[in-house]
Image: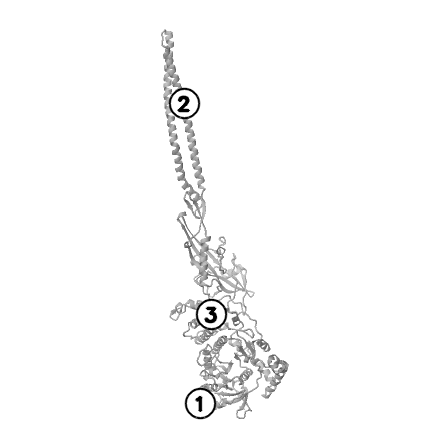
Amino acid sequence: MASKWYLGKRYDLDAGKLLDEIVYYDPDDLTTHAFIVGMTGSGKTGLAITLLEEAALTQIPALLIDPKGDLTNVGLHFPELRPEDFAPWVSPEEARREGKTVEQKAKELAELWRKGLASWGIGPERIRQLSESVAFTIFTPGSDAGVPISILASLAAPTIPWEGNQELILERINGTVTALLGLVGLDDVDPLQSREHILLSNIFRHAWSQGQDLTLAELILQVQNPPFDKLGVFDLETFFPAKDRMALAMRLNNILAAPTFQPWLQGVPLDIPSLLWTPEGKPRHSVFYLAHLSDRERMFFVTLLFAAVETWMRTQPGSDALRALLYFDEIYGYLPPTANPPSKPPLLRMLKQARAFGLGLILVTQNPVDIDYKALSNAGTWFIGRLQTERDKQRLLDGLEGAAPGMDRGAYDDLISRLRKRVFLLHNVHEREPVIYHTRWAMNYLPGPLTRAQIPLLNRLLGVKTPSPTAAATEPQAAPRASAAAAPTARPVTAHHEARVKLPGTATRPRVPGEEYFWPLEIPAAKAAKQAGLEGEYLGLVYRPALWAQARITIVRPKYDLDWEGLFAALVEEPSRRVDWDAWRAQPHDPDFFDPEPVDDAHFLPLEPPWTRASDLKRLRSDFVTYLTRHVRIPVRVHKRLKVYAGPDVSEARFKRLLREAARKGLEKELEKVRQKYRRKLERLKDKLAKEERELAQEMAEYEQRKQEEWATHAENILGLFLGKRRRLTTSLSKRRMTKQVLADITESREAIARYKEQIQEMEEEMNEAMDEVREKWAELLEEYETLTVRPYKREVHVEMFGIAWMPYHVFEVDGELEDVPAFHEPHDEEAA
């Protein structure tokens, strides 16, 4: 059993004087908790400080919730009691009002404290013992003035196993969710009625039951895209539509994105053992300074702290002795009689159950009217000081009767009415009767609440090393975007280091406002590292988002005899509202190419605008289609006169052959026209030639006959001369004339024949020339074709795939930095680009 605590000395209310009898208190009685109540100026703070001093001297660790700043005084103990020890904490304004310098006031206070402590039998050695018994640390959640507290550990899965501890973990989930909702402005939510509470609780349950930590970023992503499809018997969309979930995600994201919230993500984790003991095992008094926070932020932190304490408490073995203290300097608003703030349920449970684990609660207030005294029926010790009004006193007596049935209400009423400053009524259920006592002199200097600006000085006085602000490792880490290099290359990544470098991104896949595709793992980690020349620890796989677009274009133009089909794909790796689709051209893929699900245990980098909004993706999809209608050009060779057309799938040789085949018919037709034109002329000439040739033949025959007749006549005349016969001369001359005439006709016919032959030859040559001209014209016509480009209509562009493609990267830790290497082959179509 721990040594008894020195609280003060008995006080005689009737005589109005201090008695010599010392009042001791058994700290193990605090396992049934304590309640301190008193008006401002009653000495309540001094009482609290002396209690905590005694706890420190007996090496009882404590968690001290300080909404106003008074509890920072637990660190102002000066064993030497020198004026220079007091000087930094003296108010210049107060010294000025008294007409003194700070040094004079400090000297006065040092002497006052020396004499005051001596009057209560306390010397420098006991103060030194106080400073050495425990480690004092001032924590400032949401601020770096003191030691900041990161609330992210509150979202991490409890270290205790899920099986066998479900009730405990579910209670912590309830408290954590209630605190988060309160922080975003959803107060007084009913865990059984609130959709928001039910959704978040199920997200926590899903993660924690599998031992998976959550971060705020993970939580926001899972609100948008929960890891389950049903809640109860209803499907998710019926119970909590996506639009409403997005509204909740936005509220959560607002606090994460707010610069004022960033200090909440920095500092030491909310780990109860570390807050109660130093790494060396020395007890610690952890003061949680909350004076700088808003009411909502205070409620948020207190609820998380209660949830963490309760979880830790349930893991401890049973104990009748006091193991640790939880001290709350002003309980007003956290345990109201009718309302149900997030802090109330865990506080009620601890008041009922903490004694079994050796955890004592000390609750303090100056507003007795606004406290749920039914909850305080579990308090075994009551420290009651002066009260401001009769109403306060009667309300207190009502509560005290509930905690101590059978008490003499009238006697207590009389005692409370006569209390003076620093004089308290101590009601302890473990003692036979109440005690009126005067608190002893506090070993700590009590200047009142310290400001946030004074916290760094106080922590330096206490030897506390404030860690430099660093982003908590559990938040998603930023990683560089992959470049469009031809070969996979490694790129350095900046990351926060604690025990080791964390895998960037989140385990929760961001909600995609549309379709998504998982690029297959094409290169194993070992091969990727070897190709990149890396030697380091493999951390895992990270998916980077990219925009994948693929369209099938079908162009049908009967006019050109064109029926063409092709695929166009683009993989855009840089988020932009204006995309150069040509620069990101990629090899098309069949839908079966993609994996149906991501690789297990992979992380995902966050989406960035404009890929985060469905409307922006819709606009980009429309832009993709417009781009294709403007930039996809299919060449068509067109011969308008021959009506011959050829698309890109027809070779040049085949096209020329088609032209020749089409031209041959026209050529033959025109040649036939030429032949017909000259055929009639040639036939007339040939008829004339034939006629002349016939006439010539007749004339030749007649000539031969005439010539024979002429020779016969001539012979007859000569013979007649010898025979003495006489013929007439006229007959001979007539024969000769007729022969000459026939000979003239022959000459004329021969000339006509020669002339006709010449005309026929000329006509044939003219015809051949005309036909040659026709052939030449058609030969030239073969080359009179042109190449046109045909663009698709929008109705001919069929977008087969459009959405976010998750590109896998292997991540390695090399010399304390992250290096990532593509786990896929080069996807871009360099020739097309």
**Residue type for callout 1:** Gly
| Dot label at residue 406 | 1
Which of discs 1 and 3 lies nearer the camera? The answer is 3
| Dot label at residue 750 | 2
**Residue type for callout 2:** Arg
Evaluate whether residue 432 shows in this view: no
Q: Local crowd at mark 3 within 10 Å, few (<14), some, or many (≥20)?
A: some
- Image-quadrant location for residue 21: bottom right
With respect to residue 733, does 229 lie above or below?
below
The percent coordinates of residue 314 (x first, y second) are 47, 78
The percent coordinates of residue 530 (x first, y second) are 53, 60
With respect to residue 619, does 308 lie above or below?
below
Which of discs 2 and 1 lies nearer the camera? The answer is 2
**Residue type for callout 3:** Arg
Q: Local crowd at mark 1 within 10 Å, few (<14), some, or many (≥20)?
A: few
Query: The residue tagged with tag 1: helix, strand or loop?
Result: loop
Camera-side residue of 657 and 698: 698
Question: What whole-number distance in Å separates the C-alpha atoms at marks 1 and 3?
Answer: 51 Å
Q: Local crowd at mark 2 within 10 Å, few (<14), some, or many (≥20)?
A: some
Camera-side residue of 434 and 826: 434
With respect to residue 22, does 758 lie above or below?
above
Residue found farthest to the bottom: 15
Q: Kindly identify which residue carries mark 3.
A: 251
On screen, residue 133 versus residue 356, left or right, reads right
